Image (tube, rainbow, N blue to C red):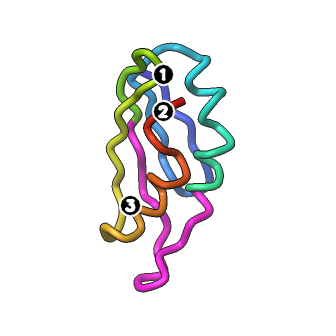
């Protein structure tokens, strides 16, 4: 497991492949810049689980479902 601190968003990769980290880095940086229009908060954290045939699972920690949906739309589940 490895972690990257991007501004205030904590990013944890439970998959040890560095290629996933590098592929997702630009998208995760964009997600880290998001702010909830309703609450004014940023994404707190994301944990990326596994990588199989281009698919991965992500668990987001945010202030609300709306911010989670915005982050997911940027990062998506296929890489």
Q: Which residues are magenta?
A: 32-47
| Residue under numbered circle 3 | 68
Q: Secondary structure at mark 2?
A: loop
Q: Are marks 2 and 1 in contact (CB under 8 Å)?
A: yes
Q: Secondary structure at mark 3?
A: helix
In which quadrant of the rendered view does residue 48 lie?
top left
- Dot 2 or dot 3, earlier in sequence: 3
The span from disc 3 to disc 1 (Cα, nearest Å) is: 21 Å
| Residue under numbered circle 1 | 54
Question: Please, what is the dominant secondary structure of the magenta stretch?
Answer: loop
> If the image is split into quadrants, where does the N terminus sit?
top left
Q: Give above or below for 74 relative to 69.
A: above
Residue placed most toward the observer, 3 or 36: 36
> Which residue occupies 57% across, 43% down?
5
| Residue under numbered circle 2 | 78
> If the image is split into quadrants, where does the C terminus sit?
top right
């Amino acid at each position: 497991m490895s972690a990257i601190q991007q501004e205030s968003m904590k990013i944890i990769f439970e998959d040890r492949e560095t290629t996933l980290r590098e592929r997702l880095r630009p998208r995760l940086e964009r997600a880290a810049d998001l702010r909830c229009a309703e609450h004014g908060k940023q994404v707190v954290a994301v944990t990326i689980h596994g990588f199989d045939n281009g698919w991965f699972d992500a668990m987001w920690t945010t202030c609300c479902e709306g911010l989670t949906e915005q982050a997911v739309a940027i990062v998506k589940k296929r890489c």
